[in-house]
Image (cartoon, rainbow, N blue to C red):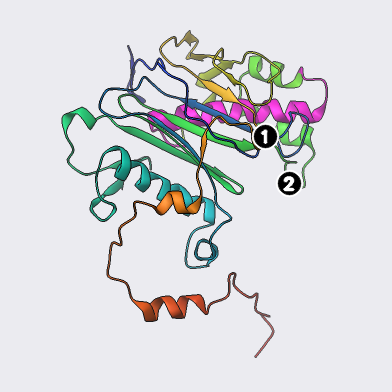
Amino acid sequence: MWRSPALPPLRNRRRASPPLSAPSEQRAPTCSQHQQLADQSGPPSAAASPADWLLPVSFSRFLHSEWFPRPSIQAGRLLIRKLIAEKLCIPWNEIHLQRTSKGKPFLANNVFSIYSNYNFNVSHQGDYAVLAAEPELQVGIDIMKTNLPGSSSIPNFFRIMKRQFTETEWGVIKSMSNEWMQLDMFHRHWALKESFLKAVGVGIGFNLQRIEFNVSPLQLEIGKMYKETKMLLDGDKEEEWMFEVCSMEPNQPQFTLLTFEDLVASGIPVTPEDSAYWDNFCCKQESPVKQNSHSR
């Protein structure tokens, strides 16, 4: 057990079973479309099973309206409701979600003590949203796509991000044989750190150099889940945390891939249907039209 005033208590998180199956949109490590998945989770209980779901979100017109957040964010919220409705048997229209002071969502409903520690986390990147859940222990997940860093060169991008990793981590990142593989390793480390911070529910003000990852293996085989990565926190090895990292392409299952129909299958309207409202909504354009600022 490790405790700090800056973080909630860290609890044992050994995983007793592999995740459910599901494909995602990952590419080979040298490709600009490569994505990394990293998460921490614990063992399933007799009360409810864990969930690892991946959802492609470019599927529904209503998710692309300017009235809603971008599709992957909205899909992540719907994934949480599906999880609670199906795993904890709480109807959609009775689910009450809140956020901690650091922004982590949690279930505010009064539930049986056997479910009191049910933990979930979502991440979204591009056209995908992903959810991981754990019945007893804390869980965090992050999905990353390796893209060129905007208009900046990779070496300049690394200089800007220098304080986000330790010297040891930068040594591993820059040891890769070419810039694309270095950028890929950068995102692998970033996903690991994000997943840990999301699991313990701390904000962006946390000093990321307090966390150091010893990634293993350096090369990931597409479609395979790895659990060898270890973490140091303030220089001390954290044996109670488990990190799973995978790199995937379509049709190589690791997570359960959901369709929109799967997502809303157990949905219950929160308010009565207003057909006029929906008709008006369907008449709107899918994205706002840019107006000429000089027009009168």
Which residue of the protein is positioned furthest toward the bottom in this rendering?
Answer: 296
Residue closer to the observer: 283 or 236: 283
Amino acid identity at mark 1: Glu
Q: Quadrant of residue 209?
A: top right
**Residue 271 visible in the shown view:** yes
Residue 29 appears left or right of 60 = right
User: Which residue does the numbered mark 1 point to in the structure image?
Assistant: 249
Q: Position of residue 53 (x, y in %)?
A: 47, 38
- Tell me which residue sits at (74%, 28%) in the image: 29
C-alpha gap between disc 2 and disc 1: 24 Å
Residue closer to the observer: 169 or 118: 118
Look at the image and say whether residue 194 sits in the magenta stretch.
Answer: yes
Of the numbered discs 2 and 1, the one sitting upstream in the chain is 2
Picture quarter with the C terminus: bottom right
Q: Position of residue 42 (x, y in %)?
A: 38, 21
Q: Residues within 10 Å of mark 2 (few under 14, many from 20)?
A: few
User: Which residue does the numbered mark 2 point to in the structure image?
Assistant: 150
Q: Which residues are magenta?
A: 175-204
Q: Secondary structure at mark 1?
A: loop
Picture quarter with the N terminus: top left
Q: Position of residue 228 (x, y in %)?
A: 56, 12
Q: Is residue 196 above or below residue 64?
A: above
Q: Residues within 10 Å of mark 1 (few under 14, many from 20)?
A: some
